[in-house]
Image: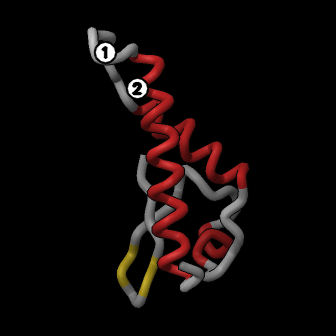
Amino acid sequence: MRVSLTVNGEQRTADDVWPGTRANRASAGGPLTDDVLDRFGTLVAAAAGPIDDVRGSAAYRRHALAVLACHTLTCAWQEYTGSR
């Protein structure tokens, strides 16, 4: 999985997250919808291979990764669009 935005000529792609064409994904200021966040969290959790141990179950860790990934994407998007 690869996620990125193009900011001031520096590329960061979102190929697995935003649906549609590359041109649609590249447009600045588009909405970061709940569907996009859910999809991103699902992809991050699916890419992980956590283990069960005394500190937490694999399911809990996958959930935590999804939540943290969504929070990170939200913060990055807000900084990118200047809405932070």
In which quadrant of the rendered image does the N terminus lie?
Answer: top left
Q: Secondary structure at mark 2?
A: helix
Position of 47 with respect to 31 (left or right) is left
Where's residue 53, x and y in %? Answer: 28, 10
- Which amino acid, by three-letter code, is at mark 1? Ile
Q: Quadrant of residue 18?
A: bottom right
The residue under the point 62% across, 69% down is: 25
The residue under the point 72% across, 49% down is: 35
Q: Which residue position is annotated with label 2?
A: 61
Depth check: give the residue in front, 68 or 8. Answer: 68
Q: Quadrant of residue 49?
A: top left
The residue under the point 68% across, 56% down is: 19
Depth check: give the residue in front, 7 or 24. Answer: 7
The residue under the point 38% across, 30% down is: 48
Q: Secondary structure at mark 1?
A: loop
Quick check: marks 2 and 1 in contact, CB under 8 Å?
yes
The vertical placement of 55 against 9, above or below, is above
Where's residue 36, x and y in %? Answer: 66, 53
What residue occupies the far bottom of the structure in this picture? 8
Sequence-wise first label, 2 or 1: 1
Position of 49 with respect to 35 (left or right) is left
What residue occupies the far left of the structure in this picture? 54
The vertical placement of 56 against 46, above or below, is above
Answer few, some or many: residues within 10 Å of disc 2's Cα (few below 14, many 20 plus, some between 14 and 19): some
Position of 5 with respect to 17 (left or right) is left
Q: Which residue position is annotated with label 1?
A: 51
What's the coloring here? secondary structure
Answer few, some or many: residues within 10 Å of disc 1's Cα (few below 14, many 20 plus, some between 14 and 19): some
- Which amino acid, by three-letter code, is at mark 2? Arg
Where's residue 34, x and y in %? Answer: 71, 52
The vertical placement of 40 against 43, above or below, is below
